[in-house]
């Protein structure tokens, strides 16, 4: 990929960019929404991702809210492809010196923020665009919340994407799973049961979301292996703890922890 423009991080520029992109999409609606996904993804990449360091909060505030749902699906596809194939371009201008392992938790956090939006957003029955109802705990810079009664929410965004674009929906949660597993494995290798259990809980949350997607069977198998690995680690650490207690009791019975030996 040829990059001629250095990416910058500027919230003000993102706001300005939003206005021009909204005009283009509103003036040229696509009749075939399925075919248009690739076009929306490429437009989002060319107009935003190629010039700015992506941030999940900016993406969902300025590039998801207020858009038609198939536009959101296309833009979500852009982020999936970027993190899966060129993760370095999410945070740097060149791949030189980039080490993915230092960004595992960062990318999982980015996915988590997008997941929260997808689960809470609704398609409005008034204009067919995507918004988040008020009082959902979101804080939007762009003021893109709506009153559910006034806008007649038609259906959740997550339901729409899973029904109309199961491949994109499945890819997104498969990506979430992949990064949660990286961090889970790190905990297992370090025998850090707290870390392993923390990311296992994330995996438990992700797996049901892959149901009825093209990735369900593959990731169910991976989930079984993760569960077995956690149980193995728990047993191993439990055995180590029991052995340590036995050694301490044995040492105490021999008077190794008695003050008397130091008073003679």
Image (cartoon, grey):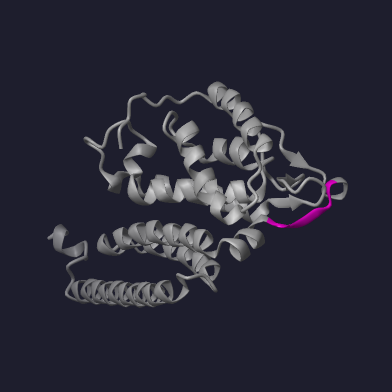
Residue 252, picture quadrant:
bottom left
Describe residue 37's horizontal placement relative to residue 125 as left or right.
left
Q: Estimate the x, y position of residue 58 in percent, counting from the top left.
A: 56, 35
In the rendered image, residue 42, in percent from the top left (x then y), is placed at 47, 42
Magenta span: chief secondary structure: strand
Indicate left or right for 73 with 197 as reference: right
Q: Is residue 154 magenta?
A: yes
Q: Quadrant of residue 61?
A: top right
**Residue 29 image point, x, y percent:** 66, 43
Q: Is residue 13 visible?
A: yes
> Is 103 situated above or below 7?
below
Would you say residue 5 sits in the magenta stretch? no
Magenta residues (range) = 151-156
| Residue at point 30%, 71% (across, down) | 237
Front position in the image: 201 or 79: 79
- Quarter of the picture containing the N terminus is top left
Question: Along the line of sight, which residue is nearer the eye, 112 or 121?
Answer: 121
């Amino acid at each position: 990929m040829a990059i001629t423009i250095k990416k910058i991080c500027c919230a003000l520029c993102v706001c300005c960019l939003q206005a021009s992109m909204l005009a283009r999409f509103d003036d040229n609606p696509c009749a075939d929404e399925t075919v248009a996904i690739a076009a929306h993804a490429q437009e989002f990449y060319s107009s935003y991702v190629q010039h700015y360091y992506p941030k999940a909060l900016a993406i969902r505030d300025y590039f998801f809210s207020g858009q038609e749902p198939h536009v959101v699906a296309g833009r979500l596809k852009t982020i999936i492809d970027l993190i899966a194939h060129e993760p370095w371009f999410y945070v740097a201008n060149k791949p030189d010196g980039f080490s993915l392992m230092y960004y595992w938790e960062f990318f999982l956090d980015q996915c988590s923020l997008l997941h929260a939006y997808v689960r809470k957003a609704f398609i409005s029955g008034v204009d067919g665009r995507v918004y988040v109802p008020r009082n959902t705990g979101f804080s939007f810079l762009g003021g893109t919340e709506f009153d559910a009664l006034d806008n007649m929410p038609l259906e959740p965004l997550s339901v729409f994407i899973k029904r109309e674009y199961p491949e994109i929906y499945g890819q997104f949660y498969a990506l979430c799973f992949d990064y949660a597993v990286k961090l889970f494995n790190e905990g297992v290798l370090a025998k850090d049961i707290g870390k392993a259990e923390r990311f296992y809980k994330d995996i438990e949350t992700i797996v049901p979301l892959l149901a009825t997607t093209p990735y369900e069977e593959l990731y169910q198998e991976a989930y079984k292996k993760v569960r077995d690995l956690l149980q193995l680690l728990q047993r191993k650490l439990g055995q180590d703890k029991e052995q340590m207690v036995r050694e301490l009791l044995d040492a105490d019975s021999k008077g190794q922890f008695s003050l008397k030996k130091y008073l003679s």
